[in-house]
Image: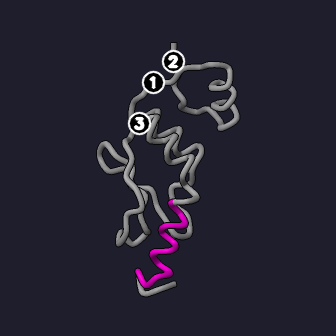
Amino acid sequence: MSISLQGLTIHEIQKYLLEGGKLTDDYQTADMLLQSFVPLRAEYYEIAFLGDEYCVRTQGREYEAARVPRTLGGVMILIANIEALNAKCALYIAQGGRNGF
């Protein structure tokens, strides 16, 4: 049996998952989980919801660091790699993309 993540805090979601709780692999659950654990905008990147994919790109849309499926697996990939993707976007900007910093 799976539950909706609607209205749960990050702590409640973590507790539910650590106790062996199951999640439905759909867009709504994946989006809620992503928004709970990863900021959608940071200094050098933004995460865009593009149909059935998440796209990590610079805020001006000039450079895409990664595209992952809009599933629970894709969310896990983003959570595990968000610092490296942020660094890729920053490096793009530092090397002359968007006319430098």
Label 1, label 3: how far apart the Cα atoms are:
10 Å
- The image quarter containing residue 28 is top left
The rendered magenta stretch, by its main secondary structure, is classed as helix
Look at mark 2 in the image and give the residue it sits on: 2
Give the amino acid type for the residue marked by disc 2 in the picture. Answer: Ser
The correct choice, above or below, for 86 with respect to 14 in the image is below
Give the amino acid type for the residue marked by disc 1 in the picture. Answer: Thr
| Percent x, y of residue 99 | 42, 87
| Percent x, y of residue 11 | 70, 35
Of callouts 2 and 1, the N-terminal one: 2
CB atoms at circles 1 and 3 under 8 Å apart? no
Look at mark 3 in the image and give the residue it sits on: 71
CB atoms at circles 2 and 3 under 8 Å apart? no
CB atoms at circles 2 and 1 under 8 Å apart? yes
Q: Which residues are magenta?
A: 85-97
Give the amino acid type for the residue marked by disc 3 in the picture. Answer: Thr
Closest to the observer, 12 or 80: 80
Label 2, label 3: how far apart the Cα atoms are:
15 Å
Q: Residue at x 63, y 31 (%)?
A: 13
Closest to the observer, 16 or 81: 81
Q: Nearer the viewer, mark 2 or mark 3?
A: 3
Q: How many marks?
A: 3
| Percent x, y of residue 38 | 57, 50
